[in-house]
Image (cartoon, coloured by chain):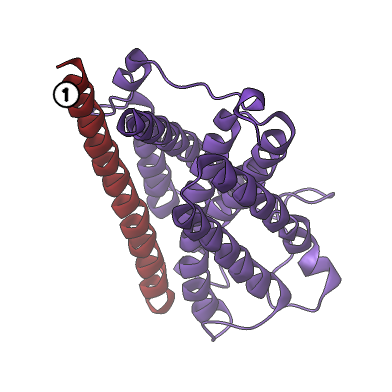
Amino acid sequence: MSESVVREHSPAPAAVQSTHVGADWLLVVAILAVLGTAVRAIYFTPVDALQGAAQKIFYVHAPSAFVALYMAFALVALMSALFLWLKDLRFDRVAESSAEVGVIFTTVVLTTGPIWGKAAWGTWWTWDARLTATLFLWFIYVGYLVLRGAIDDRMMRARYSAVLGLLGALLIPFIHLSVYLFRTLHPMPIVFKPSAPSLSPEMLHTFLLALGSFALLFIALLRIRYRLAVARDELAAQEER
Amino acid sequence: MTPHTAVFFHAAYTVAAVIYGTYIVTLLRRSASVRERVRRQGKAERG
């Protein structure tokens, strides 16, 4: 690919200076929001009559899954498509950053889920459609990050990973619909569904608060990770000179 | 709280805190390290 068609926006030294994250205010706010949500979930939200305290895992598991699927990996797909279209490396940096943060959120989903499953179903894991597809999604984006580390050429790395990032996101609608399409142990949606949410008002408020605070945490981490990607590219450019 | 399932609830919250916490610390350390290398490299280039 000709360099003339690549829109590389090399960060100016001033932009690298702005990568200072010693006291990232957004991250501090996000962490406080997540901690506040945990306190509300533990001490001020009713205990489920059937599942007992284990149901409170919902306030970490479900928001983490929502953020990973519908924010992080959806953003990877969008940014990957924009990169393939416009060849602007800023889109690649956002995709890379979002994929890494999304993998962390999915790791939390895949570890808290089995713990909740053991309490609710009596088994840590079952190979049903939603669980298996989520595990595959995790493998795809771990592979995406490994692939990025294995290619030195900046444009080739961006192009190959954009294709993988876009293809991986095809699993998202499948994961969303899997509980409707297949017989599965995983429960149907209880909040985001056509009818009214099947939660008491206190539980619903705690869930929405958790969703907001985890979304804020994602944005804060994405912001820091994007700045790291900018600084790394600047370092690579300096070393080439 | 139901004692039996409270164990699972505590385990899940602890695991989530460890994963998110470890990533945040690692990310901040990586950022600081790259920033420092950029600063040193820039200083060396300027002479």
Percent from the top left, x then y, of residue B41? 21, 28
Percent from the top left, x then y, of residue A47? 49, 61
Q: Label 1 is found on which chain of the structure?
A: B
Q: Quadrant of residue B1?
A: bottom left
Q: Colour of chain B?
A: red
The front one of A90 and A173 is A90
Badge 1 element: helix
Percent from the top left, x then y, of residue A186? 68, 72
How many C-alpha atoms fall within 10 Å of the one at disc 1: few (<14), some, or many (≥20)?
few
The amino acid type, in three-letter code, at marker 1 is: Ala
The residue at which mark 1 appears reads as B44
The residue sitting at 16% across, 23% down in the picture is: B44
* A131 horizontally vs A206: left or right: right
Residue at the limit of the structure toward the bottom, as seen here = A122
Which quadrant holds the C terminus of chain A?
A: top left
Which quadrant holds the N terminus of chain A?
A: top right
The residue sitting at 40% across, 79% down in the picture is: B4
The chain that appears purple in the image is A
